[in-house]
Amino acid sequence: MTEQIDKALAREYEAGFVSDVESETFAPGLDEDVIRRISAMKGEPEWMLEWRLSAFREWLEMEEPDWALVDYPKVDFQAISYYSAPKSMKDKPKSLDEVDPELLRTYEKLGIPLIEQQMLAGIAVDAVFDSVSVVTTFREKLEEAGVIFCPISEAIHKHPDLVKKYIGSVVPKKDNYYAALNCAVFTDGSFVYIPKGTRCPMELSTYFRINEQNTGQFERTLIIADEGSHVSYLEGCTAPQRDENQLHAAVVELVAMDNAEIKYSTVQNWYPGDENGKGGIYNFVTKRGICHTSAKISWTQVETGSSVTWKYPSCILKGDNSVGEFYSVALTRGRQQADTGTKMIHLGKNTKSTIITKGISAGRSNNSYRGLVRMNPGAHGARNFTQCDSLLIGDQCGAHTFPYVESRNPSAIIEHEATTSKVSDEQMFLCRQRGLDPEKAVSMIVNGFCKEVFKELPMEFAVEAGKLLEISLEGSVG
Amino acid sequence: MSNTKSLLTIQDLHASVEEKKIIKGLNLDVKAGEVHAIMGPNGAGKSTLGYVLSGRDGYSVESGSATLDGKDLLEMETEERARAGLFLAFQYPVEIPGVSNLEFLKASVDAQREARGEDAITSAEFLKEAKAACKQVNLPVSFLKRGVNEGFSGGEKKRNELMQMLLLKPKLCILDETDSGLDIDALQVVAEGVNSQRSADRSFIVVTHYQRLLDYIKPDFVHVLSDGKIVKSGDASLALELEAQGYAWLQKEPAEDELEG
């Protein structure tokens, strides 16, 4: 059976093509001068440059973390280029008609048509290609509702007060090594502001694409949901198939004001490297949200790509009665390594958090859940429920669970459940005896295992996630 | 019935599990529409026969042949045998958490239809059939939404197997000790389900330990399997004889290493 599964897992990476787009790319290397040049390219105000430089100085003093259960050759930060943009973006296109057709074709090939008429109704997209945002759709419609959805580079110019107030407010500059690096060199990303009492009229989504070789992607996303507002946001990401490892170090900050709700979903499909672990994206990401009184933040992630993943979308439950949720499916195969989970920091009274994770390991991969639940002294009546399930496919992979629980309030209740199971010979035999081929059988069993998380995704993306798993498992049985 | 053609023909079949010989020269001919009961003591190879015929991993055929409808069964993959019309009702049906019965059954039916060059069944049509099948095996319709066998009682699992059989409409059904763990009411439901499916072009192999099931499903032939071979065949009355006298009078002394399996 193991042999069948291995075969089924040897799939093609469908997003692995390279687009022929003329780019303007910085020579590799990192120093203050590079940061000044990035800032100048974006025409940034002085305060932004100063903020970047202070982060860079902090970063120089910091050490790369090594506590995660991942093993990879250390990154040579001087060998990476920190800025790459399609040349056609130099005179920023004012409408879709002016966007380089090759760029539009790239996104279309990835299944994300940017022509508004062809898009799924009700989803606005910001497309980020290497270091710049190329298109943001449905902006006028969103503006009617008072919603701001634009590249963060643009928000720095047009909404400096909001950016100044909130950037770095949830993930401080020196929070961790990769976050500090991101603060210094971030190039683009999305900015969202939902005004008071507004329900965002459509799903917002950002698609990140790394194209250029030897280029790092450092995007930064900031979402502010003002009092009583509601927004659902999705990000997707892909990269070409290359032999070298590429670094992706993003920061995402969410601010949910009183009674606001943010639903943040990720379908991560960066290039995972080949069967022997050659190439692939290092995905070192810091994502965190803060919930004010009675606010709610829900993270849902489906992680199938990247050669190394280091990612812990977290919630600071500051306001009383606030709610944090984390739903995760992480699939690793080949030589992929994932160390992922969440942090739920309970500060307010009667705060609630739910963590449901499904780790699927196949091939020779390693998949770890690492999660912290902390009840601070003020968290009277707070509750957490955690459920971590691991599914093993074959007998050469690893699944690990590292739960950290800190309770400083005796009235807080913390529950933790964990299971580990295998796709069993009996299950495979039952499916095949009923006429299903082994690939369909594995994908069905895995999809069933992930059902609790998939039902949290917006509908269109739940279908996409199911298909992605199916593709990821193709050839894992034979 | 001697004029009808053979559906399943097994000739001098030898098979082993983990290098241990279990089936040792088995011959069986099942014609279309017949019901054959296979009885025998523990360790005779009754369940192994079902697994070998359906192509379970780890069960290897050493020699002999088995054909279904004239096609060489042993050359086919597990799922190809299923698509060719072979159905095995499990003694201990396994759970598949999170995969709804409906989803599982529709995928199975569609896989078999595809193999026959037919289009997938529409969801509406399938739901109608599945609801009818539920009713027939006395399972609430809500079971279609539940995970495959997830949290089902022993009896519910067996009825679920039967429901799968009703929907897949196989040519040859092998019931592997379907009566084990069933109370008398559940046994009757299962037997009625099987009887309703008896037809001129569908055959059954009923593997059982006890005569009890055969009170409800009347077999055309009864075979006694002992030490990997059929040692006696007869009509339904043989089952009664076995019930009265046990198996000892048919068994040769087993060798030490053949006691398990």
Image (cartoon, rainbow, N blue to C red):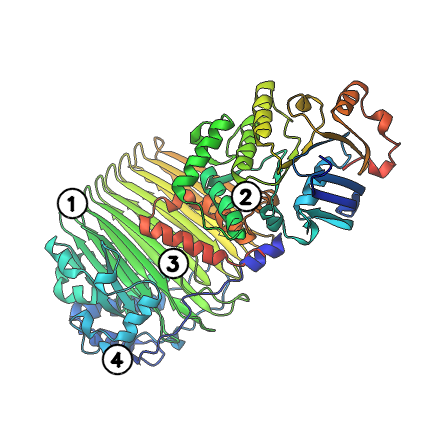
* Residue matched to label 1: A227
Contact flag, marks 4 and 1 (Cβ < 8 Å): no
Residue type beneath disc 1: Glu
Where A81 falls versus A47 (above or below)?
below
Q: Chain of mark 3?
A: A
Q: Is residue A189 visible?
A: no
The label shown at residue A421 is 2
Residue B207, image x, y percentages? 69, 32
Which of the pair A21/A351 is nearer the observer? A21
Closer to the chain start, of discs 3 and 4, is: 4
> Tag 4: Cα neighbours inside 10 Å, few (<14), some, or many (≥20)?
some
* Residue matched to label 3: A268
Residue type beneath disc 3: Gln
* Residue matched to label 4: A87
Closer to the chain start, of discs 1 and 2, is: 1
> Tag 3: Cα neighbours inside 10 Å, few (<14), some, or many (≥20)?
many
Q: Classify residue B171 as left or right of residue B6.
A: left
* Separation (CA) of disc 4 from disc 1: 40 Å
Contact flag, marks 2 and 3 (Cβ < 8 Å): no
SS of the residue under disc 2: strand
